[in-house]
C-alpha cells in the first residue's frame, strides 16, 4: 500500500589478514636474461587485481618499468607457499612478501651493475625506465637487460630474491583474554537508503554512500571496482542469498539461479564512495586492502535502514519479503521511525 | 544412434560437424568446434554466460538444440575481435573495469552486441534490460552498464 523510505548506517573496523600461525606468504622474484622479471606466487588472483598490484609493487621496489615484470600465480605445487586469497590479506601479506623479494633481487642487480660499471653499488640508482646509472652522472649507465645478460653469462650471478611476510603469532593472555589478532586495521562507514513496500515486504535499494579508509590505494581504479562490486555482494547477502541449511528446511534449498536469488542489473542503485588514504606503517607502500570489508558494512546498514523505514528489527539474514511482512504484521503495521 | 550431419556458419566461417541427437549448441561449439568462448555456467538458462547470437539474435546456447542452427549463422565472442584489434565493446569493457573474474564477460559482451547491433543509441534502462538475463557476481553491474553505454553510438556521437 505504501512504500516507506528509511536510512541506516553502519561502521566497521576490519582486520587485515588473520592470526593463524602468523599468516605467512612467500614470494620469489628472478630476472630472465632479457632483463625482465618474474614474480612467482602460489597466491591466486580471483579477479580483484592482486596480479596487477603485486606487479606494481615489484616494479616500484626493483626500480624498473611495470611492463618489465610478469607475475606468475602458478599453482600451490610449484610456487612458494601462500596461505591463500582471503581475509583481505592479498595486497598486505603477499604485497609485503613481494616487496621483500624484490628488495633482495634489487641488491643483486645493483651489485652486478656495479661490477659492469666498475663503481660501488651504493653509488648507483635506477631510473625506473630500465636503466641503472651512477648517482649524479646519468651518462654512466647500463640497461637492466645488459646487467641481466652480464649476470647470467659473465658473472655467474642469479639476480633473484626471496621474500616472506610473517606476523608474529599472538597468543591469548590466559588472565585477561587479551591478544593482538592483527597488526593492521581498515575502517569503513556506509549509509544505505532503502524503500520498503509494506504490502509486499519487498526492499529496494535507493542509494548507498560510503567512506573507506584502507591505507594507500596502490591502484585506485582497482580499489574502486572492488568497492562497487563488493557492496553488491553485501546487498545480496542482506536481502537475497540464503546459505545452508536454507529456509525453513534443507529440502527447500535452491536448485538453480531462479531459486537462488542474486541482484540483477535492474536492482542496483547509485553508490557514492569516498576513499581516504592513511598509509599503514606495516603495509607495502602503506597499503592495507579493501577485500571483504567492501561487503561487510552493507548488511547492518540495510537492516538498520529497514528498521528506520518500517520499524521492524530483523536480525536473521537474508531479510526476505516474507520476514519483513511477518514482522510488520506482528507489530500491527508499519511504524516509520524518525528520518535521520 | 546415427550421428546427424550439421552445417552452419560459425563466426563467418562454414563449419560441418556430426552431432548426436539432442546435443545442445554449447556442447557442439565447445567440444566439437573447439570454440571455448561461450562458457558453461548453470546449464539451465539461468546465468547467461553461454549466450551466443544466432542470425544476430541473442540465444542461450545451453538451451538451444544444435540441430536448429543448420544453415544459420552463429556468432560467439571468439568472432568479436576485428583482426588484431579489440571490438569497441571489448575495449570499453577493459577501459571501464567491467570484468573481474571474467566468467560472465563472454555472455555480457554478446548480450551487449545484440543490443547495440539493433539499437546503437540505447538508454540506460535499455542497457539494463538487455543484460538482465546475465548474472555477474563481481562487478555490481554498474561498470558493465557504463562500458556498454560508452561503446554505444549515442555516446560516440555525444
Image (spheres, rainbow, N blue to C red):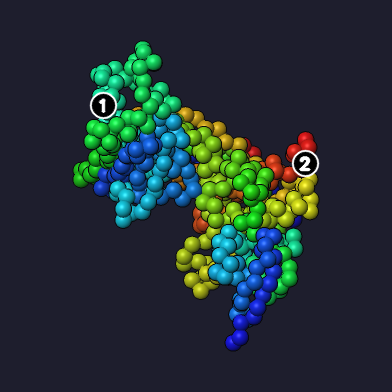
Camera-side residue of B45 and B10: B10
Visible in this render: residue A16? Answer: no
Image spot of residue A16 (x, y percent): 38, 41
Image spot of residue A290 (x, y percent): 46, 40
- What number is the disc on residue A111? 1
Q: Residue at x 33, y 54 (%)?
A: A76
Image spot of residue A260 (x, y percent): 57, 64
Visible in this render: residue A318? Answer: yes
- What number is the disc on residue B154? 2
Q: Quadrant of residue A221?
A: top right
Q: On the picture, is B45 further left or further right than A245?
A: right
Q: On the picture, is B3 further left or further right than B58?
A: left
Q: Residue at x 36, y 12 (%)?
A: A136
Instruction: Label 1: state its secondary structure.
Output: helix
Camera-side residue of A87 and B139: B139
Q: Quadrant of residue A166?
A: top left
Image spot of residue A106 (x, y percent): 31, 30
Amino acid at each position: 500500500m505504501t512504500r516507506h523510505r528509511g536510512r541506516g548506517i553502519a561502521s566497521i573496523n576490519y582486520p587485515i589478514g588473520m592470526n593463524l600461525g602468523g599468516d605467512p606468504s612467500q614470494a620469489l622474484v628472478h630476472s630472465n636474461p632479457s632483463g625482465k622479471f618474474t614474480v612467482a606466487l602460489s597466491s591466486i588472483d580471483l579477479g580483484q587485481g592482486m596480479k596487477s598490484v603485486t606487479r606494481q609493487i615489484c616494479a616500484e621496489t626493483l626500480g624498473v618499468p611495470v611492463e618489465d615484470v610478469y607475475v606468475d600465480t602458478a599453482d600451490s605445487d610449484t610456487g612458494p607457499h601462500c596461505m591463500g586469497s582471503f581475509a583481505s590479506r592479498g595486497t598486505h601479506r603477499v604485497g609485503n612478501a613481494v616487496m621483500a623479494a624484490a628488495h633482495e633481487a634489487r641488491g643483486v642487480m645493483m651489485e652486478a651493475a656495479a661490477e659492469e660499471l666498475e663503481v660501488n653499488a651504493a653509488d648507483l640508482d635506477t631510473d625506473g625506465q630500465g636503466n641503472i646509472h651512477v648517482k649524479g652522472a646519468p651518462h654512466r649507465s647500463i640497461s637492466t637487460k645488459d646487467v641481466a645478460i652480464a649476470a647470467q653469462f659473465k658473472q655467474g650471478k642469479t639476480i633473484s630474491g626471496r621474500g616472506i611476510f610473517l606476523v608474529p603469532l599472538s597468543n591469548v593472555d590466559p588472565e585477561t583474554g587479551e591478544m593482538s589478532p592483527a597488526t593492521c586495521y581498515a575502517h569503513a562507514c556506509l549509509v544505505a537508503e532503502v524503500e520498503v513496500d509494506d504490502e509486499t515486504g519487498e526492499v529496494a535499494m535507493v542509494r548507498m554512500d560510503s567512506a573507506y579508509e584502507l591505507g594507500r590505494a596502490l591502484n585506485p581504479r582497482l580499489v574502486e571496482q572492488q568497492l562497487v562490486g563488493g557492496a553488491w555482494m553485501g546487498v545480496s547477502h542482506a536481502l537475497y542469498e540464503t546459505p545452508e541449511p536454507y529456509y525453513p528446511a534443507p529440502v527447500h534449498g535452491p536448485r538453480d539461479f531462479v531459486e537462488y536469488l542474486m541482484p540483477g542489473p535492474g536492482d542496483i542503485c547509485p553508490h557514492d564512495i569516498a576513499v581516504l588514504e592513511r598509509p599503514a606503517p606495516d603495509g607495502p607502500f602503506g597499503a592495507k586492502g579493501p577485500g571483504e570489508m567492501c561487503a561487510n558494512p552493507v548488511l547492518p546498514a540495510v537492516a538498520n535502514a529497514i528498521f528506520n523505514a518500517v520499524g521492524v528489527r530483523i536480525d536473521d539474514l537474508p531479510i526476505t519479503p516474507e520476514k519483513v511482512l511477518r514482522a510488520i504484521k506482528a507489530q500491527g503495521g508499519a511504524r516509520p521511525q524518525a528520518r535521520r | 544412434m546415427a550421428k546427424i550431419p550439421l552445417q552452419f556458419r560459425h563466426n563467418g566461417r562454414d563449419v560441418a560437424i556430426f552431432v548426436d541427437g539432442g546435443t545442445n549448441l554449447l556442447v557442439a561449439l565447445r567440444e566439437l568446434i573447439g570454440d571455448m568462448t561461450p562458457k558453461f555456467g548453470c546449464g539451465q538458462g539461468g546465468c547467461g554466460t553461454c549466450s551466443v547470437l544466432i542470425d544476430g539474435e541473442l540465444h542461450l546456447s545451453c538451451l538451444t538444440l544444435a540441430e536448429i542452427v543448420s544453415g544459420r549463422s552463429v556468432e560467439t565472442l571468439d568472432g568479436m575481435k576485428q583482426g588484431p584489434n579489440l571490438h569497441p565493446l571489448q575495449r570499453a569493457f577493459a577501459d571501464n573495469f567491467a570484468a573481474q573474474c571474467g566468467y560472465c564477460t563472454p555472455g555480457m559482451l554478446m548480450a551487449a552486441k545484440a543490443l547495440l547491433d539493433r539499437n546503437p543509441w540505447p538508454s540506460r534502462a535499455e542497457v539494463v534490460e538487455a543484460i538482465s538475463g546475465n548474472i555477474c557476481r563481481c562487478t555490481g553491474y554498474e561498470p558493465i552498464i557504463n562500458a556498454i553505454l560508452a561503446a554505444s553510438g549515442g555516446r560516440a556521437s555525444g
